Image (cartoon, rainbow, N blue to C red):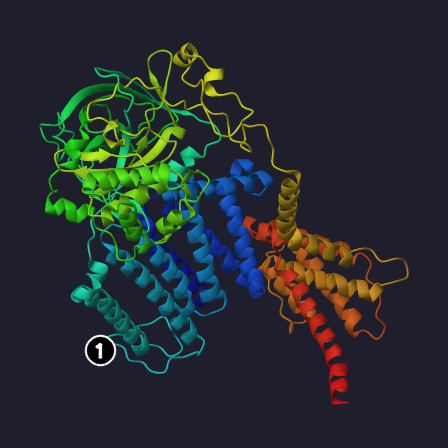
Amino acid sequence: MSGRGRLACCAALATLTAACALLPLVDPATWLLQAALLIAVQTGVGAATRRVPLARPVTVLTQAVVSALLLTVVFAREYALGGFLPSPAGFERFGTLFQQGIDDVSRYAIPAPLTDGIRLMLVGGVLVIGLLVDTVAVTYRSAAPAGLPLLALYSVAAGLSQGGARWLWFLCAAGGYLLLLLAEGRERLSQWGRVFADRARPGAPPHQPGSVGGPAMAPVRTGRRIGVLALGIALVVPAALPSLSGGLLEDVGTGGRGGGDKGGGTVSAVNPVVALKNSLNQPQDRTALVYSTEGDDDQELYLRIVALDKFDGAQWKPSERRIGEIPDPLPTPRGLAPGVRTSTVRATVQASDSYAQDWLPMPYPAQRVRVDGKWRFEPEGRTLVGYDRQTTRGLRYTVESLRVRPTAEQLRNAPAPPPALKREYTAVPGSLPDVVPETARKVTRGAKDNYDRAVLLQDWFASKGGFTYDTEVSAGTGVNAIADFLKQKEGFCIHFSFAMASMARTLGIPARVAVGFTPGTARGDGKMEVGFQDAHAWPELYFEGVGWTRFEPTPTRGTTPPYAQPDAPDSDLDPGEELPDRSRNDQPSADPSPSDRCTAQQKQADPECGLAAPLPGSRDSGQGPPLAAVAGLGAGGLAVLALLLAPMLSRMRRRSRRLRDPAPGTGGPEAVLSAWQELIDTGWDYGIVPQDSATPRTVAARLARVGELREEDAEAAQRVALAVEQVLYAPVPRAAPGIAGEVRRIRAGLRSAAPRSVRIRALLLPPSTVRLLWSATRRVRRLRGAFRKPVRGALSR
């Protein structure tokens, strides 16, 4: 293998070792094998184009086109022309997968499942990094800057990964980069022809001058030592400095969808904010859950999914918690005293096939759960989380929960919470804008206790503060998101719950945010139907003796609990008020509502009845893409196809012009020289590189020997060589009739003797087409010289 070939292999290996840092992000890791195969093909294409040789930009362009074709074969084969050429439907498929990948990245925790969208982002990203590294290190012969894309790949993985052993991935990435530098150094050193010194170890065989394949030379050994020392310092020094928090050796624990083994592990949730907004903004509602209750006809049965208890100033998210087996019954709710009145509600829940969630929706606080599958219990949030890809899709389960009925007086007289709980759930970052605590103090001015402060905050958001409910408003990011919401006063439940919980914490009230569903809509058969548009978020505030208590600051959404209503009596209210109608929408729509389309009996007989129709623009909606988009994608596909076929078509045109029969009485010697040039280029296409200093007879003999021509084809090559010598050296050149046929016969002989790979290369990517680039370069130089002389003369005058 040549020096540049070894350098290309090292560049591919460096990319794959850096890509290993992405392994903890998804499960399973089979995508890496796929990426390795595509990187190998991409590297091989680069090596072949550099061997031709082609111009550097053409080499990079060829690798990029082949990479696009490889991605088309892997991810959009059924939408491609011939199974590998991109088409308008193929581009649409890539856009769909990429958007799905973005949504999945935002939705899932680490390690995320290997969906098609995430797989496209991983494999495509590694392929792009591999192309950059190969271009910089091999094509342009500068391995040191190639470390920047490798560093970017490792940095993204290290920033997202929450798993341990990050030092191992650092070693892989750094080792691959050092190997790339070593290969480039050896390749550069080999161009000198001999080494500067022979300093082999004592007892080793002497190193022959002029060879770079023997024992390691002193500069190489020194470079290895420096590399090992640098890696050691990078790993050990951060671990020894407390200000760096352990550096690469720090073990932050493992996070996952459901923990590790059967009995325990840790859990971190999907991003509920993104899933919640997507559910609220669906054009048509779809059924997520259907449930019925026994023992207490409760119209305030919020189905809670997860609690967000960690606030960093920019967003609320769930903490990483320990999970374990589901106890029976579940532990007593934290902070609930015996004097608070409670009642038991038994709910039987049926999830639809279109609802797949890692967390089990349950009324809070649940006491007993009967559910099949792989579920684990997280005690702090009193939630159940699935592991090993367990979801709620089509699940049927039963939950016994408590309806806690505190009075306003009990909440007003609640004692101080435990110090540890208050410290954890009233923590706010220093980056929180000052307008948040200032507004909280202004709204609650005059309140005597935490209960009055909570009610004042709730009423200010729900009715008195001038806020409007709008699901089209962006959820907002960064430390100024809450401040912007307080200023603009437009948002949906995420904004209201996040803002109220944050302001409550600044007032010293323990607070967190719950995500789940509102009670839904009553059906005629006595069951409740919960749709995706019933997704909701609400704040939970802690009162000692009662526990975590729900409040409702979002206007026009949900129901305000009796204990949080202003001027409400302390006794329980008659829960006979009308439930909200989920089918009612503030904006008119031409589509019939779900209740108009399906009766209760139809829904019970057909679970798919009432589900949303396909989204506009989807494949099943009957609406095709715009004509302009189709035309643009078609033009792009034709351009790619023309680019791929350009070398073959140009070579065929040039061969036809050279071997065409001249008109009678014209073009005799010129036809002989054109046919000779075609014969030389044909040999080049089949791997016989031309030698400008060789005589025609030597060229013909070399074609016969290297091309393994048959005897009659070798004699034809000698006849062509003699005709060329007669044209070049005879006093009176004369034509050679039938020379074009001789060249065609020799070409057929070379083709039949060549391997299949060589025949394919000679057809699709003939090396002799590089003459066109050389010719174009000469023309540009001539034109530049022709313009430069008069311009210089004008300037001198």
Q: Is residue 375 visible?
A: yes
Q: For the residue labelled by badge 1, is the local secondary structure a helix, a strand or a loop?
A: loop
Which is nearer the eye, 467 or 182?
Answer: 467
| Residue 481 falls left or right of residue 660 | left
* x, y percent for residue 642: 66, 50
* x, y percent for residue 740: 77, 56
Which is nearer the eye, 612 or 524?
Answer: 524
Quadrant occupied by the C terminus? bottom right
As drawn, 375 above or below 312: above
**Residue with the mark numbered 1:** 202
> The disc labelled 1 sits on which kind of residue?
Pro
Mark 1 Cα shell of 10 Å, populated few (<14), some (14-19), many (≥20): few
Residue depicted at x 38% and y 44%:
105
Quadrant occupied by the N terminus? bottom left
Residue depicted at x 81% and y 62%:
736
| Residue 469 falls left or right of residue 329 | right
* x, y percent for residue 283: 49, 31
Residue depicted at x 17% and y 34%:
411
- The picture quadrant where one finds residue 699 is bottom right
